[in-house]
Every structure is written in C-alpha cells, then in structure tokens.
Amino acid sequence: MKKVIVITALLLGLLLLTSSLLPAGDRDDYQVIKKAVQETPKVEPAKEVKWFKVLVTDTKTGKERVKITMPIALVEIFARCADNKEVKLGRDGCSLNLPELLAELKKVGPLAIIEVNEEDETVKVWLE
C-alpha cells in the first residue's frame, strides 16, 4: 500500500513538474503567432501583361520553327471580334468564354500557359 502511495505521489510530482514547463512553451508559441500576425507580408502587385507569345522549337536541332509575339491588346480585340465568343470543349460541349479567360489570365500577370514536349518539337505558349 505504501508503494502505491509513493508511486502515485511521484507520478503527481512529475506531472506537476512537466505541466509547469508546458505553459512556457505555449507562451512562446503565442508570442510567435502574435508577431507573425502583426507583420504584414510584402506582396508585390502582379506585373502587367503586355505580350502573348508562342514558340515552337525543333528539339533535335534547337532551331526555332515558329515564333509569334503579339501585343495582348491585339489578342483581346481578336477575342472580342470573334463570331463565336464561346468555345466548345470536348464531347460534352463545355463552353469557354475567350474574353473572360483573357481577362482572368491578365489579372494573374506574366505566366506560362502551356508547354508541350514531343519527340521532334517543343511548343510553349505564355504571357509576358
């Protein structure tokens, strides 16, 4: 019986000792979180998109087969002037509005739209 009381007392003492150490860690965590929330991250606005570019390169020779650089404003005009502004994709006929797509891509800023690598050539389309 005395052994049980001694073991219980030791466990309680150990528990109290470790519990007094934990709140200090919580306070440190709180300070780190508080500091992180107070600091405002520096986010640069997206650069303005000016060019629509397409590049087709021969992978064997490294030569450029096709290189197209168009002002994005001209691409937007073509999209607005198209007879059918809705492009149907796939068998289900999912529609895609070209002027809306261009507007959303411009908001993001310069980015690679697609890159296709084949045996003989690489095709890259991007906004710059």
Image: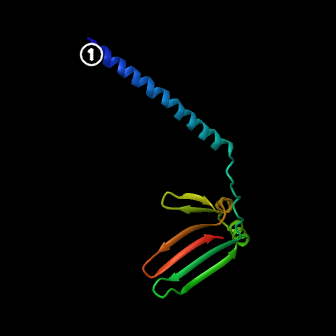
Residue at the (36%, 17%) spot, across then down? 9
User: As drawn, is 56 to the left or to the right of 127?
Assistant: left
Instruction: Give the residue at the far top of this rendering.
Output: 1
- In this view, the residue in front, 19 or 9, is 9
Q: Which residue is mark 1?
A: 3
Q: Position of residue 18 (x, y in %)?
A: 44, 28
Which element carries disc 1, helix, strand or loop?
A: helix
| Quarter of image, res 100 | bottom right
Residue at the (52%, 35%) spot, across then down? 25
Q: Position of residue 75 (x, y in %)?
A: 69, 71
Residue at the (55%, 85%) spot, across then down? 65
How is the structure coloured here? rainbow
Q: Is residue 111 above or below residue 9?
A: below
Q: Is residue 27 above or below residue 62?
A: above
Q: In what quadrant of the picture does the N terminus appear? A: top left
Q: Is residue 58 above or below residue 43?
A: below
Q: In what quadrant of the picture does the C terminus appear? A: bottom right
Residue at the (73%, 70%) spot, across then down? 73
User: Dot 1, crowdedness within 10 Å: few (<14), some or many (≥20)?
Assistant: few
- In this view, the residue in front, 74 or 78, is 74
| Quarter of image, res 54 | bottom right
Q: How many marks?
A: 1
Q: Position of residue 67 (x, y in %)?
A: 60, 82
User: As drawn, is 114 to the left or to the right of 53?
Assistant: left
Q: Position of residue 62 (x, y in %)?
A: 50, 86
Amino acid under label 1?
Lys
